[in-house]
Amino acid sequence: MKERMLRRYLLYACAVTWVVLSGCQQAATNRSADTIAQAHTPNAAAETSSNSAANHAANSAANFDYYLFTLSWSPEYCHGHPNSPQCDGEHPGFVVHGLWPQFDNGRWPSACSSAPGLSNPNRMLDIMPDRRLIQHEWSTHGTCSGLTANQYFGAIRQAYASIKIPPQWFHPARTSTKSASEIKRDFTDANPGMSDADIAISCHNRYLTAVAFCLSKNLQPVACQAVTDCNARSIRIPAAQ
């Protein structure tokens, strides 16, 4: 009697174990099949990547805090790039480098979409005398502005027209030396309503390379955030070529 009961118990235990193991194996098989099916779905990874890139571009465009409008000092640039189109002798002073969307933390968005640039870039050559620069500024910075190419370059021209270049900077015949604060003062004196905090000075090896202006999205002067000034005590300003 005891042996018969023990035999029944063992048979029952084996049956339960078989059911459990079968269920686990089936679940594992199902998971593996789902994973393989997902991995081999045509274009699944490419479609996910494409959607992610599109969403990133849409979220990046116009998602910034202010503009950095940069005027390059052509005499210094042309010293190292004499064959550049902007060094033809017709642009002796400042030329537009770009209008760059910025974040308050010092970072910036870049290349937010593949939207086409200007159909006729020649119309910007009077203030941006290099077609390659025009295309670069659009593809790298303009696509993150939330504007069309026409609107973006219209904003560049508006920003350029809104800033008065001090008369002593039009065509300096001699190389001079100034501090960053003195350069800023030249521009604040010529542009009422603009303060030192709205301007950043760039230099390389103590030579002036650019003067930049922090502007709101509606192109009004605003205080720069996390923009580094040239820290040289005196900055050499090459004469106009």
Image (tube, helix red, strand yellow):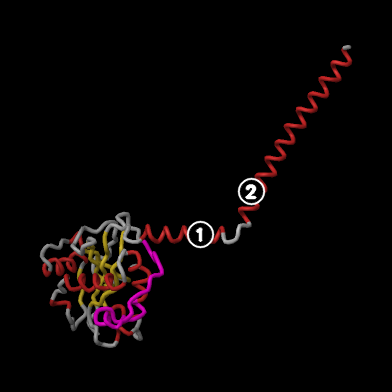
Identify the main secondary structure in magenta.
Answer: loop
Q: Identify the residue position indicated by label 1 in the image.
A: 49
- Is residue 129 located in the magenta-colored stretch of the structure? yes
Q: Which residue is mark 2?
A: 34
Residue in the image at 35% along x and 82% along y: 81
Against 30, residue 149 (above or below) is below
Q: Residue at x 32, y 57 (%)?
A: 63
- The answer to whether any part of residue 235 appears in the image is no
| Label 1: few (<14), some (14–19) or many (≥20) C-alpha neighbours in 10 Å | few
Tell me which amino acid carries mark 1. Ser
Q: Is residue 232 magenta?
A: no
Instruction: Identify the residue at image location x=76%, y=27%.
Output: 16
- Asked whether residue 16 is in view, the answer is yes
**Is residue 101 or residue 54 the one in the foreground?**
54
* Amino acid identity at mark 2: Asp
Tag in front: 1 or 2: 2
Q: Position of residue 44 (x, y in %)?
A: 56, 58
Of residues 22 and 90, which is closer to you in this image? 22
Quote the CA–CA distance across marks 1 and 2: 20 Å
Q: Position of residue 37 (x, y in %)?
A: 64, 53
- State the image quarter where residue 89 is shown: bottom left
Q: Residue at x 72, y 32 (%)?
A: 20
Place residue 73 in its image quadrant.
bottom left
Point out the stretch of residues depicted in magenta.
109-134
Label 1, secondary structure: give it: helix
Is 112 displayed left or right of 74 in the figure?
Answer: right
